[in-house]
Image (cartoon, rainbow, N blue to C red):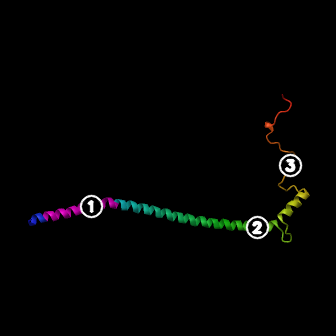
Amino acid sequence: MDTASLLAIAGAAVGGALAGAAGCYWPTSRVIGDLRERLARSEHARNGAVERSAQAREQIAQLNRAITELRRAHSAHSTPVGSQISPREQVEKALADGDDETLVLPRREAVQAFADTQVMAGKG
């Protein structure tokens, strides 16, 4: 083997290595670029979810404060300080007095369910 053939073999090996590296680099760089885009989108989505979660927590805290304030205002208006009457006693008193403010209406007549399905007497 002379120097020219060794130089040709070495040049072919180097050229093949460069071609192989370029052949691997091009699709690999595309895949890495796509993965970076996906990672950026997922990070953006995660940051948005964290912001929405924090906003939801703040809204829940505001609603809880509002509910607490309404409960305090309602309890201050509904029961005077001196009288502690249980709800059952309030209902019994309202029914005994015949109070019109009760939500229970007296039943005036019996409700007849399935009136159309009764056997007709007298036909035959």
- Going by the picture, which residue comes out furthest to the left? 2
Mark 2 crowdedness (10 Å alpha carbons): few <14, some 14-19, many ≥20: few
Say which of 6 and 19 sits in front: 6
Mark 3 crowdedness (10 Å alpha carbons): few <14, some 14-19, many ≥20: few
- Going by the picture, which residue comes out furthest to the front? 124
Residue 47, image x, y percentages:
50, 65
Q: Which residue is mark 2?
A: 73
| Residue drawn where x is 66% and y is 65% of the image | 63
CA distance separating discs 2 and 1: 76 Å
Residue 107, image x, y percentages:
86, 48
| Residue drawn where x is 53% and y is 63% of the image | 49
Q: Which residue is mark 3?
A: 107
CA distance separating discs 3 and 2: 35 Å
Judged left or right of residue 61, residue 113 is right
Question: For the magenta stretch, what is the residue range?
Answer: 7-29
Mark 1 in CB contact with mark 3 (< 8 angstroms): no
Q: Which residue is mark 1?
A: 22
Mark 1 vs 3, N-terminal side:
1
Residue 44, image x, y percentages:
48, 63
Judged left or right of residue 12, residue 40 is right
Disc 1 secondary structure class: helix
Disc 2 secondary structure class: helix
Residue 54: assigned label: none
- Front position among marks 2 and 1: 1
Disc 3 secondary structure class: loop
Mark 3 in CB contact with mark 2 (< 8 angstroms): no
Mark 3 vs 2, N-terminal side:
2
